[in-house]
Amino acid sequence: MTPSPAPPPPPAPSADVLRGTLDLLVLKTLTLEPMHGWGISQRIQQFSRGVLDVNQGSLYPALQRLELKGWISAEWRTTENNRRARYYRLTAQGRRALGAETETWRRYVSAVEWILATG
Amino acid sequence: MSVLQGLRRRLQLVFGARAADRDLDDEIRLHLELETEKNIRAGMSADEAWRLARIAFGGVDVTKEAHRDGRGTRWFEDLASDARFALRVLRRSPALTLAAVITLALGVGANTAIFSAVNAVILRPLPFHQPDRLVMLWESNPEFHWDQQDVAPANMLDWREQVHAFSDVAAYMDGDATGTLTGQGAPRLLSVAGVSGNFFSVLGVHPEVGRALRDAETWKNGSRVMVISDHLWREQFAADPGVVGRTIMVNGKEAQVVGVMPRAFRFPSETIDAWMPLALDPASRGDISFRRAHWMRAIARLAPGVSLERANAQLQTVVRRLQVQYPETNRVMGAGMTPLHAFLVRDARRPLVTLLAAVALLLLIACANVGNLLLVRAAGRERETAMRLALGAGRTRLVRQALTESVVLSLIGGAAGFAIGWWGTRVLIALQPPGMLPAGEVRMDWAVLGYVVAITTLSGMLFGVAPAAWSARRTPAEVLKEGGRSGSDARRMRRWGQALVIGEVAIALLLSVGAGLLVRTFYELTQVNPGFDARGVLTVALGASGPRYDSDEKVQAFYADVLRRVRALPGVTDAAATAELPLTDWGWTSQFSVAGRAPGEYGNEVAHREVTPGYFRTMRVPVIRGRAFTEQDAAKAPRVVLINEALARQFFAGQDPIGQRVAFDKSPDSTSVWRTIVGVVGDERQTSLGTETKIQFMTPFAQEARQEMTLVIRTPGDPATLAPAVRRIVSAVDPGLAIASVRTMADVRSASLARQRFLMMMLLVFAGVGIALAVVGVYGVMAQYARGRSREMGIRLALGAQRVQVRWLVVRRGMWLVGAGLAAGIGVALAATRFMQAFLFDVTPVDPVTFVAVPLLLLLTAAAATWLPALRASRADPVATLREE
């Protein structure tokens, strides 16, 4: 019984939108617990029920952006399997930013919805 | 808090770029491993798992690039790598690097040294409170040809009262006054300044110990006080604060020390020891002499908010009023003001600015040389550059890299230049004519450092432009195709190099002409007949002041005693005394009238000097007519005078002055003293070799005593050997007297030329370095040229041309280049040297001798520089040349 390969990923949205939402998703993901890069990508995939499966590589520039803004901080730790991984954690400022960004996102979405609904 | 964390991360990335790269590699690797493991758990094969993991990740290199770009430190990393590359390149060609660094260091070093002097003298503000509010007041008189001259006390006091634009006016005595300090060990001669009581308050300086002077102390009031300098305090009183209140003996009279001034305050002279009140006599306030004798310098502080123009307008109003009120003294006496700093530096400004211009030109030559060196090297690296262009390097990146190389080179050269400059300031201070530069102030401070950085950067950009532009031009295909050595672009590079060299030669010529003019001036000055024989004469300056010498007889007795004993010394052929030495100062001046002439026909600005009999014989000044003074011209004898030739020519042309009577007033009355002219003596240069002899009267010391006289002692041998014996005599006659100075007349003469000599030496040094650099440049360019045509020359030689003819090809080109440079240089020099007029004596700015000799000299040196490459080119083996490609 050969398992079927994973379904092909849906077409990715444009880069700008992607960057902003990616940051938001990363922040949200980290509210639960500190995680390393791969873990974050798995969690995002998990929670979006397979809809969002962006290039995993684009995660790392995003993580750096957030780190330089001071919204997340990072440290090297060992995983359960005794491997060296860089764990990212949400900072207080990041937590505040998450709230603000979420608000902005919601307003953005409703605006787009409204435009699309009318006319 | 979190912002700090972000910043910390940024710094980490800046300084640990490579570590950050490695970290990212680890992260990505872990990510891929975990993804692969997940895929394996889902049932895929190892290879399939890995492949899908890679696909899911996306481009690894793209991620790394994006990560690196996101750091925001890209430009910095590029700069760092460019700099590292530049250093490697420089290390690869050590000879070229060394040559460039040395050339730059010389240029930057010379500029640093001169700039530190300019900074100390001209740029740095005076160490007073709000120095830009201080002005120097001076008087002028068209009849006496006075301009910016000393002020008369009565006029100064009137200005102080009547010009409301001045918040206060202080005064000090012009000239070097001395006083002898006794009772504190060996008698010590002090440099003392007589100042008004408000002197320190007007300047806005505060003592470090004790108090300054008070306004009321300007006037004589029975007590004598003084303020001493920090330097005297430390040397003589061991910095004891108890010196305040102590009474010391100056010139035999008691004076109480009331304060000590801080070390930084050295006004009006660098070596000032003490300040004492002028102690003007209030009773003489109304005397005409109070308004007639000009001997003060006056400094005014402008009231807050008052402009210079308004203050000057008010001053002129008062001046006009005084002209009307006191016609006898002030009829044509004008006055003016100059900002204090400008006034104080007026003598040093021109020479320093000239030197600054000279070293700037030197730096240009240095940059041209380095530019040429780099250009040659850039041409030599053409293949490398072409390769890099072909492999995808951006042109901007290449240009930036070339510029970085230039900047790195200029930084190294600049650092070396800073060191040379530091050494240069030491040399400047050691060689300078005394008093021209404030020795304590000439140092390397932030302003100098800033200047060094600025000129280094500018130089780097200047000589970096050529090679950078060069790297940007070529297309890779052309270079990789042709040999790289010949071709139109190589010719263009050689032309650039040749153009640079023409410029270098022109600038070197300009510098050399300037130096040459100064050399001629100096020579002309040394050829001037001073009017006396300076060889074999010792001069000893003495001051017989104090209570021991409170009458003319006592002063005259003292000098008579000293002279008698000096004449008795073995080796002394003649000895006499004079109030002023020639080539130093012309003493006091007055007007005069001649008996029997029309009233209203009087002379102005005649100098006076008191001498003992034997002066003219001692100094070998010829007595043209009549006789010199003798012992018969004593105190009670009829009053006599001698005149100098200049006075005879001007006022007694066609007449015999002997027997005529003169008075030192412009309108003599019953109180005037009439003196009979008994002789005419030869002209002596009174202030300097370059200044015309002033009309002068000599009076016998026996009839007009002066406390300060200088002995002149003639000996056939070396006059310096007499010094100890003379010192012994003086201290035997009066142990409490300190000797002001002991110098040979030859030294006095040499000192009078000190400024011209200094300027000449400096310009000679700079011109010499400039010529050397230009010659090196010529050599380099000619060597390039010869190399560039080596194939052609090989062919010619192979076809039977003589070696001489081949050599001639190169030499001809070289001569053409040098000639063009000389022509351009001469053209600029003809226009520019008129700015040197003030420094020249008896030499026109377009002196033909200089303008012929100097280009000739440069032509010969440059010809030598051309000869060597020509020789080498002609010696080359034609076969070998043709074979190499």
Image (tube, coloured by chain):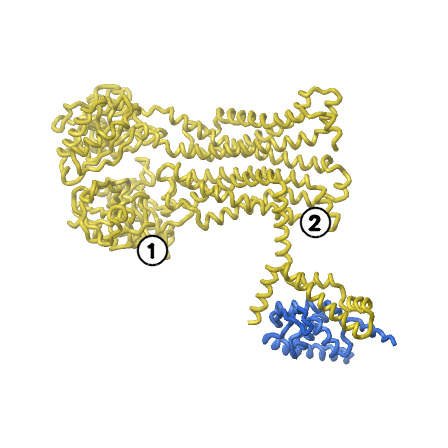
Chain colours: A blue, B yellow
2 or 1: tag closer to the N-terminus: 1
The residue most toward the right is: A1
Residue B8: percent from the left, percent from the top? 57, 65
Residue B551: percent from the left, percent from the top? 13, 36
C-alpha span from label 2 to label 1: 62 Å
The residue most toward the front is: A82
- The part of the image, by quadrant, that contains residue B736 is top left
Q: Secondary structure at mark 2?
A: helix
Q: Is residue A41 above or below residue B615?
A: below
Q: Which residue is mark 1?
A: B303
**Label 1 neighbour load within 10 Å: few <14, some 14-19, many 20+:** some
The answer to whether B719 appears left or right of B676 in the picture is right
Nearer the observer, B267 or A118: B267
Q: Is residue B58 above or below residue A30?
A: above
Q: Amino acid at mark 2?
A: Arg
Nearer the observer, B463 or B161: B463
* Residue B310 visible at all: no
Quadrant holding the C terminus of chain B: top right
